[in-house]
Amino acid sequence: AQTVTQSQPEMSVQEAETVTLSCTYDTSESDYYLFWYKQPPSRQMILVIRQEAYKQQNATENRFSVNFQKAAKSFSLKISDSQLGDAAMYFCAYRSAPMGNTPLVFGKGTRLSVIA
Amino acid sequence: ETGVTQTPRHLVMGMTNKKSLKCEQHLGHNAMYWYKQSAKKPLELMFVYNFKEQTENNSVPSRFSPECPNSSHLFLHLHTLQPEDSALYLCASSQEVASGNTIYFGEGSWLTVV
């Protein structure tokens, strides 16, 4: 079974600085999808960024980018120019790519605090 | 504003009560999900519905009973729950269950069992 590990329960960053959240996963599959979700105090899970494993190019979405290292099974999230609104729980998630019904597997999350 | 709406947002129930959580999605999706989020544990997938048909039951106790009358609505019927069932229950939807489809979440229903 696939597992997702987020080794940093809590992180903090100064406003306008850059922070990197770590995520590693364990799988024997070669084709899959990886996601970062943000969960602010409102508790809604919001998709931040996604990466297809077959793509070598790292995904980017404005201030958010990933460092996808397939061989190392690592998928870190970099937040640039951090803003107060970035404070939230961040969850890394994995999903197998074969056809049919495959669940999202989540890590335990990293709580990010942004210091003004 | 979210495309996935959950009600109630907060629910307190006794162990002998029967209550239901409701989820509605306005995104035209065909797949809907229930997740459970407990403190200090990863999100756990409970049920998956695809085109109104249940395609996954992730070993969930029978005191949780899902219902999907159409692709836009999903219910979670609760009866004789235990205090350890207290958690945030998240509903989600996606275009289909295929892996590449992004899953969109509601804001969750906080359940406290007393």
Image (spheres, grey):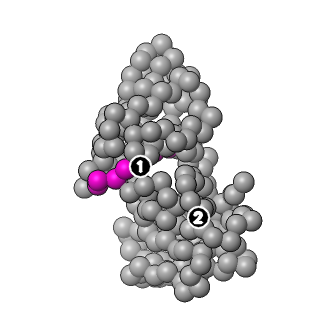
Q: Which residues are magenta?
A: B27-36
B108 lies left or right of B81: left
Label 1 secondary element: strand
Q: Nearer the viewer, residue A56 or A110?
A: A56
Type of residue at label 1?
Ala
Disc 2 marks a residue whose amino acid type is Ala
Question: Residues at badges 1 and 2 in contact (C-beta under 8 Å)?
Answer: no
Frontmost residue, A17 versus B3: B3
Instruction: Look at the image and say whether residue A106 sits in the magenta stretch.
Output: no
Label ID, residue A97: 2
Q: Quadrant of the N terminus of chain B?
A: bottom left
Q: How many marks?
A: 2
Residue B22 place in picture, x, y as percent: 34, 34
Residue with the most extreme top position: B16
Image point 41% across, 79% down: which residue? Answer: A61
- Using the rendered image, report if marks 1 and 2 lie on a common chain: no
What element does badge 2 sit on? loop
What residue sits 49% from the left and 43% below the top?
B48
Chain letter of disc 1?
A: B
Residue B65 point in image, percent of width and height: 48, 27
Q: Is residue A71 above or below residue B85?
A: below
* Residue drawn at x 66%, y 60% as measured from the top left: A4
Q: Which mark is residue A78?
A: none
Q: Which mark is residue B31?
A: 1
Q: Residue at x 56, y 59 (%)?
A: A99
Q: Main secondary structure of the magenta part?
A: strand
Q: Residues within 10 Å of mark 2 (few under 14, many from 20)?
A: some
| Residue A81 in sight in this render | yes
